[in-house]
Structure formats: structure tokens, C-alpha cells
Image (cartoon, rainbow, N blue to C red):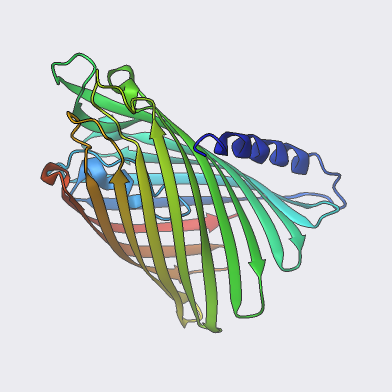
């Protein structure tokens, strides 16, 4: 069963190519969204994993050994959007580049690149296909297993993910979204046995309480299989099963001011059966709460302020961590 997602990922890519080649019935329109955010964190090594815990990002990004380092991170991004129409309905093709630039710990700098296509299938149904690439991301110093000496080495990972979302509005109040994902994580040579293939299945439901309030509840299951599973030479199997639940509320306080409140719980059970492996019988639990205020200055521009608290606990106590993030930012569409 673990090998079945590969054809799914190929189907994602094939589907995207087919959709892009459909004849257009109207002239395309172009737009762009520029965003910038400045964040403070008290845990440099796990800032990225905490920031990207949302289902729409990368909720299974590996966490690192916790640090006491704090930093200020600048997070600029630019998304270019092409809106058009095919025989199936309206669609959007977008390309987004995002950077994370650390003020005092530049070794952690990384980029996030995304290609996305969304096709309307009917007035109430749409299909989204997304490819994301995060190359050569530094996770932090860690103990390698390949030499047998457990030397401290830089741990780096490159992640590629293919994602689909099928969204259907059941009625004016309820919207259901089905989520599928397949991904590859490729580590640097010192941690090559951790190279992982993973697949994700899940769903989200949105309920519109009234014109000023909507609620969201979601669940995903993920299975990851590492190249090092069963290898007694390295005793380093990062294969896992992951369960995550997300709940949120969007509230319009006044016409120009909105509040988002969210909570995410993630449980990651490592499935190693190697007696000498620190992942044997390891379970990680993460709780995250966040609040974000967004103020709309004009139809094209907005400001935001957010607070996020993440608490990680593990049966391996050296992996326990907490991360507090304060952010200020803004966006402009042109």
C-alpha cells in the first residue's frame, strides 16, 4: 500500500498539464500579490516547522533539536496570478516565491517556491493542483549515524510535495474539501538514510454561521517511509504515522477588520523497530494556538498582526520544545 501514491503524484502532474492546455474562451487577466512579514521567535531551529504547521503548508516538516536562540525573520513573498477561463469554467494559474531571511542566524535562510493551478468545474466545485519545492533547508546540527561515531553534522533537507484539493460547496452554509498529498524529502549525505517518501489523505469542512463568522474543522493522516527502515547498520529509521486535527474561526469584527483564531494538534508516531534506534517507541505531540488580526486599508492592501504559541512534547525529552512567534506584516495586490 505504501507504493500506491507514486502513480497519484504522476496523475497530479499529468492533470495539471492537461488543464493548462485546455482552450481559453476569454482573454487572460494578470495580477500579483506582494507580501512582507517580520517575525520574532524564541526558537530559531523550530521556527520554520512551527510556522508551516498549517494544513495548507507542510504540517509534517521535521522538527530539529531545540535551541535557546531567538531571532527576527523577514519573510517577503511575491505571487503572480493569471486568471482565465476554459471550457470547464474559470481558472487561476499562479507562481509564488517566498523567502525566510534570518537577521542573526543566516545559515537558516531558505526559499519556498510554489506552482498552483485552480480550475472551476461547476459553480460549486473546484479542483486545485499544487507543486511546492523547498530546497536545501538547514534544520540544525544533529548526530549522524552513518559513520558509527555519532558526530555532530549539519542536517539539511530538500522537500518536494504535490497536492490536490477537491472543494465542493454543499449549500450556502457548508463547504467540504478533500485533500491528497504526496511528497519526497531528500537529506544531505550525512543523513541520507532519512530520505523519505510520504503521502497524505484528509478533509476539511467549513460552516458559515452567519455573514460575519465561519468555522473550519479538518483532519489529515500521513504515512512516511524512510530509506533507512530495517537497516541495522545505521539504526536510524525516521518512518512515521502522523495524525493532525485543525480547528479555526474567522470573525469579521467590523467591515475592515477581521480576526482568525486557530488551533492545531499533531501526533507523530515513529514506526522504527530497530533496537538501537532513538526513534524506537518515540511519539511526538505538538499543540499550537494562534490569533491573527487583519485590517483592510483599501480594496488592494491590508495589514496584519499575529501571535502564535507552539508546544512540542516527545517521549525523547531532548526533543521537547516551545516556540513563541510575534508577527507584523502587510500585503498589496496590483
Total marks in image? 0
Left-right relation of 249 to 142: right
If the image is split into quadrants, where does the C terminus sit? bottom right
Left-right relation of 268 to 92: left
Q: Residue at x 18, y 34 (%)?
A: 278
Q: Residue at x 21, y 37 (%)?
A: 104
Left-right relation of 161 to 276: right
Out of 17 and 318, give the one closest to the viewer. 318
Q: Is residue 52 visible?
A: no
- Residue 130 location, quadrant: top right
Q: Position of residue 115 (x, y in %)?
A: 59, 40
User: Where 63 sits versus 329, above or below?
Assistant: above
Q: Position of residue 72 (x, y in %)?
A: 25, 46
Q: Is residue 10 visible?
A: yes
Q: Position of residue 40 (x, y in %)?
A: 24, 52
Q: Position of residue 245 (x, y in %)?
A: 39, 62
- Residue 324 location, quadrant: bottom left
Q: Residue at x 34, y 21 (%)?
A: 192
Q: Residue furthest bottom?
A: 210
Amino acid at each position: 500500500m505504501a507504493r500506491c501514491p507514486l502513480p497519484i503524484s504522476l496523475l497530479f502532474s499529468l492533470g495539471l498539464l492537461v488543464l493548462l492546455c485546455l482552450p481559453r474562451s476569454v482573454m487572460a487577466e494578470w495580477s500579483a500579490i506582494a507580501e512582507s512579514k517580520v517575525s520574532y521567535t524564541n526558537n530559531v531551529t523550530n521556527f520554520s516547522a512551527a510556522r508551516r504547521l498549517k494544513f495548507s503548508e507542510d504540517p509534517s516538516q521535521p522538527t530539529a533539536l531545540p535551541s535557546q536562540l531567538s531571532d527576527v525573520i523577514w519573510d517577503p513573498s511575491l505571487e503572480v496570478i493569471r486568471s482565465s477561463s476554459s471550457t470547464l469554467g474559470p481558472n487561476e494559474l499562479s507562481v509564488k516565491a517566498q523567502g525566510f531571511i534570518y537577521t542573526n542566524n543566516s545559515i537558516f535562510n531558505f526559499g519556498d517556491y510554489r506552482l498552483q493551478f485552480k480550475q472551476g468545474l461547476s459553480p460549486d466545485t473546484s479542483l486545485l493542483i499544487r507543486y511546492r519545492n523547498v530546497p536545501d533547508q538547514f534544520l540544525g546540527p544533529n548526530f549522524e549515524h552513518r559513520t558509527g561515531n555519532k558526530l555532530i553534522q549539519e542536517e539539511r533537507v530538500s522537500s518536494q510535495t504535490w497536492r490536490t484539493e477537491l472543494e465542493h460547496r454543499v449549500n450556502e452554509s457548508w463547504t467540504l474539501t478533500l485533500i491528497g498529498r504526496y511528497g519526497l524529502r531528500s537529506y544531505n549525505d550525512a543523513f541520507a538514510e532519512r530520505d523519505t517518501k510520504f503521502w497524505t489523505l484528509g478533509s476539511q469542512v467549513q460552516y458559515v454561521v452567519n455573514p460575519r463568522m465561519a468555522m473550519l474543522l479538518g483532519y489529515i493522516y500521513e504515512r512516511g517511509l524512510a530509506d533507512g527502515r530495517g537497516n541495522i547498520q545505521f539504526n536510524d529509521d525516521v518512518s512515521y504515522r502522523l495524525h493532525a486535527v485543525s480547528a479555526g474561526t474567522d470573525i469579521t469584527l467590523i467591515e475592515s477588520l477581521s480576526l482568525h483564531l486557530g488551533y492545531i494538534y499533531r501526533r507523530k508516531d515513529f514506526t522504527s523497530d530497530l533496537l538501537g534506534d532513538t526513534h524506537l517507541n518515540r511519539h511526538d505531540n505538538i499543540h499550537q494556538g494562534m490569533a491573527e488580526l487583519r485590517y483592510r486599508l483599501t480594496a488592494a492592501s491590508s495589514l496584519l498582526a499575529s501571535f502564535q504559541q507552539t508546544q512540542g512534547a516527545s517521549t525523547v525529552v531532548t526533543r521537547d520544545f516551545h516556540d513563541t512567534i510575534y508577527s507584523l506584516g502587510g500585503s498589496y495586490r496590483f
